[in-house]
């Protein structure tokens, strides 16, 4: 079993900042990629940012230059620093982890989601 615990969502004014965190625990052998996705009502879940085991990062065009993804390898934790937030960033943000379990099964695990609300 692998668990993801997310934290850091909340209400912020436009132009403000928030930092999300997602800690993975359980039967993890290795993590290939950790990422953040977001979803608004009636819309599909979309990629926000990912970070691969070698440190390579990838961002959606809508957050490039404003958001920064980082990872603490020792703690199996991924962070998303969100600056210059806009009302259109309002969404439920989900953490995702892909890798291998200690029994060598593929892992593709989602967090429970954390709500980010940006007021204008």
Image: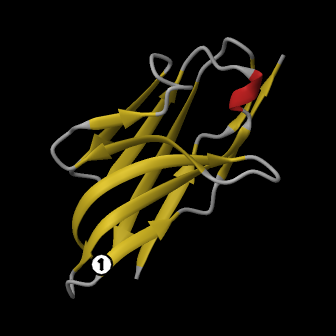
Which residue is painted at 77% across and 23% down in the image?
Answer: 87
Horizontal arrangement in the rendering, residue 45 relative to residue 61 (left or right): right
Q: Nearer the viewer, residue 103 or 64?
A: 64
Relative to 2, residue 115 above or below: above
| Residue 26: quarter of image | bottom left
Relative to 74, residue 111 above or below: below
Q: Where is residue 64 shown, x and y percent of the image?
A: 46, 22
Q: Secondary structure at mark 1?
A: strand
Horizontal arrangement in the rendering, residue 118 relative to residue 6 (left or right): right
Relative to 53, residue 88 above or below: above
Q: Where is residue 14 shown, x and y percent of the image?
A: 74, 15
Which residue is painted at 65% across and 15% down in the image?
Answer: 16
What colour-coding does the image apply? Answer: secondary structure
How busy is the neighbourhood of tag 1: few (under 14 within 10 Å), some, or many (20 plus)? some
Which residue is painted at 35% across and 74% down in the image?
Answer: 107
Q: Which residue is mark 1?
A: 106
Q: Nearer the viewer, residue 44 or 50?
A: 44
Q: Where is residue 3 shown, x and y percent of the image?
A: 46, 71
Q: Is residue 12 visible?
A: no
Q: Where is residue 62 shown, x and y percent of the image?
A: 56, 26
Which residue is painted at 42% across and 39% down in the image?
Answer: 79
Horizontal arrangement in the rendering, residue 12 relative to residue 54 (left or right): right
| Residue 83: quarter of image | top right
Give the position of the N terminus as an image quadrant.
bottom left
Relative to 7, residue 105 above or below: below
């Amino acid at each position: 079993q692998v668990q993801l615990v997310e934290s850091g969502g909340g209400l912020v004014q436009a132009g403000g900042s928030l930092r999300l965190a997602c800690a993975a625990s359980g039967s993890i052998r290795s993590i290939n990629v950790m990422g953040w996705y977001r979803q608004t009502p009636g819309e599909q879940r979309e990629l926000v940012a990912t970070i691969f085991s070698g440190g390579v990062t990838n961002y959606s065009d809508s957050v490039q230059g404003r958001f920064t993804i980082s990872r603490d390898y020792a703690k199996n934790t991924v962070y998303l620093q969100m600056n210059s937030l806009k009302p259109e960033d309002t969404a439920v943000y989900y953490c995702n982890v892909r890798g291998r379990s200690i029994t060598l099964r593929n892992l593709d695990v989602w967090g429970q989601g954390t709500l980010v609300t940006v007021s204008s």
